[in-house]
């Protein structure tokens, strides 16, 4: 079953930043899609919980150099 979560991401100041966030998330296993929104400081992620969890996604965003927290 696919799951959708929304993260708050701070530190994205241009569309390339958003691209970096998306790339970092998509490198993980079990990610269906990721879309980062620089204007709203959000990243929406569709993933398969059997393969990856929220904390791993959070970690990937932070390792890419951004602050992140889970919204819903
Ligand atoms: Mo453009 Mo975003 O240099 O850091 S990638 S501002």
Image (spheres, rainbow, N blue to C red):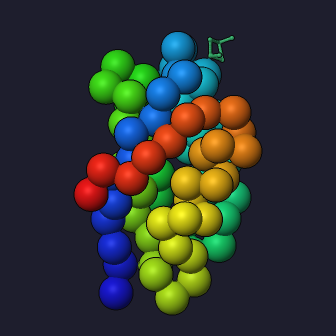
Position of residue 13 in the picture relative to residue 4 (left or right): right
Residue 49: x percent and y percent? 46, 81
Residue at the far left in the pictured view: 72
The quadrant of the rendering that contains the C terminus is: bottom left
Tally the numbered discs. Answer: 0
Residue 66: x percent and y percent? 61, 33
Residue 21 higher or lower than 41, as above or below: below
The quadrant of the rendering that contains the N terminus is: bottom left
Residue 4: x percent and y percent? 32, 65
x 30%, y 50%: residue: 71
Quadrant of ligand 1 in image: top right
Query: Which quadrant of the view contains residue 46?
Result: bottom left
x 45%, y 70%: residue: 47
Residue 53: x percent and y percent? 52, 73
Residue 5 higher or lower than 64, as above or below: below
x 57%, y 83%: residue: 51
Residue 40 higher or lower than 62, as above or below: above
Can the viewer see residue 46 in this picture? yes
Can the viewer see residue 32 in this picture? no
x 50%, y 42%: residue: 68
Query: Which quadrant of the view contains residue 56?
Result: bottom right
């Amino acid at each position: 079953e696919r799951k959708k979560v929304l993260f708050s991401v701070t530190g994205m100041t241009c569309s390339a930043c958003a691209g970096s966030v998306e790339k970092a998330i998509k490198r993980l296993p079990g990610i269906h899609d990721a879309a980062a929104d620089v204007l709203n400081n959000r990243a929406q992620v569709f993933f398969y919980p059997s393969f990856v969890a929220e904390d791993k996604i959070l970690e990937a965003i932070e390792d890419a150099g951004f602050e992140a927290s889970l919204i819903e």
